């Protein structure tokens, strides 16, 4: 009998009991779920909060229509036709244009792409919410290139947003 090698990270229940944050770090680093084994059987899969919020946003994006369609990109300006000022803008638009997300999930993903966080020192999104309420946009600056992005967001609920445009 041959065993199939899993192409995803794995951990044991004991590993989770010892340090669940380490398992979450592995999930973030590999951008996939970590299979948790209990006595050689899969007991479950662990993902980080940011990964979970993205999945929920994707599901909600598939199930719900945007509530404020007036700010969305015009149909004739599809993702293939849209021109971007930078590769970062293109990456952000492609990653977030098809689903809704929380401000925390957006910030976490942009930090992973090399942008400076907008969250407060306690990990809160109050500063982001204030900026968004004032201008309906968020401005991000890349750590290494000082490239600036201006994100126009559409609120879908009190906590979830959809991206309308990236400049």
Image (cartoon, rainbow, N blue to C red):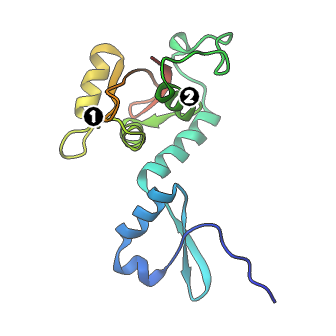
Residue 8 higher or lower than 130, as above or below: below
Q: Would you name the residue on which mark 1 appears?
A: 118
Q: What element carries label 1?
A: loop
Q: Residue 88 carries which label?
A: none
Dot placed on the residue nearer the N-terminal end, 2 or 1: 2
Residue 25 higher or lower than 131, as above or below: below
Who's the residue at 56% across and 28% down the image?
97
Q: x and y percent of residue 52 in the render?
A: 49, 51
Query: Mark 1: few, some, or many residues within 10 Å (few <14, many ≥20)?
Result: many
Horizontal relation, residue 54 to residue 17: left or right: right
Q: Tell me which corner region of the image, top left, top right, bottom left or bottom right, holds residue 18.
A: bottom left
Q: Where's the N terminus, which quadrant?
A: bottom right
Q: What element carries label 2?
A: loop
Q: Nearer the viewer, residue 141 or 10?
A: 141
- Please state the total of marks drawn on the protein image: 2
Residue 164 higher or lower than 36, as above or below: above
Who's the residue at 56% across and 23% down the image?
66
Who's the residue at 53% across and 20% down the image?
67
Q: Determine the residue located farthest toward the front in the rendered image.
A: 145
Q: Would you name the residue on which mark 2 appears?
A: 97
Q: Which of 44 and 96 is in front in this view?
A: 96
Q: Determine the residue located farthest toward the left in the rendered image.
A: 121
Q: x and y percent of residue 30 in the render?
A: 51, 59
Who's the residue at 40% across and 37% down the image?
110
Horizontal relation, residue 123 to residue 115: left or right: left
Q: x and y percent of residue 63 in the render?
A: 63, 35
Q: Tell me which corner region of the image, top left, top right, bottom left or bottom right, holds residue 94.
A: top right
Measure the alpha-carbon separation of dots 2 and 1. Answer: 20 Å
- Marks 2 and 1: CB-CB under 8 Å? no
Q: x and y percent of residue 16 in the render?
A: 41, 76
Q: Determine the residue located farthest toward the right in the rendered image.
A: 1
Horizontal relation, residue 58 to residue 81: left or right: left
């Amino acid at each position: 009998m041959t065993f199939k090698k899993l192409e995803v990270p794995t951990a044991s229940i004991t590993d989770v009991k010892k340090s669940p944050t380490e398992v979450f770090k592995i999930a973030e680093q590999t951008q996939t779920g970590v299979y948790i084994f209990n006595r050689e059987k899969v007991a479950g899969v662990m993902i980080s909060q940011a990964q979970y919020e993205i999945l929920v946003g994707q599901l909600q994006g598939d199930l719900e229509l945007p509530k404020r369609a007036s700010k969305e990109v015009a149909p004739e300006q599809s993702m293939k036709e849209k021109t971007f000022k930078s590769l970062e803008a293109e990456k952000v638009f492609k990653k977030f244009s098809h689903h809704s997300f929380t401000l925390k999930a957006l910030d976490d993903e942009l930090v992973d792409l090399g942008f400076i966080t907008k969250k407060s020192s306690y990990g809160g999104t109050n500063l982001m919410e204030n900026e968004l309420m004032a201008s309906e946009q968020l401005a991000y600056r890349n750590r290494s290139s000082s490239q600036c992005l201006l994100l126009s967001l559409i609120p879908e609920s009190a906590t979830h947003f959809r991206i309308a445009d990236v400049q």
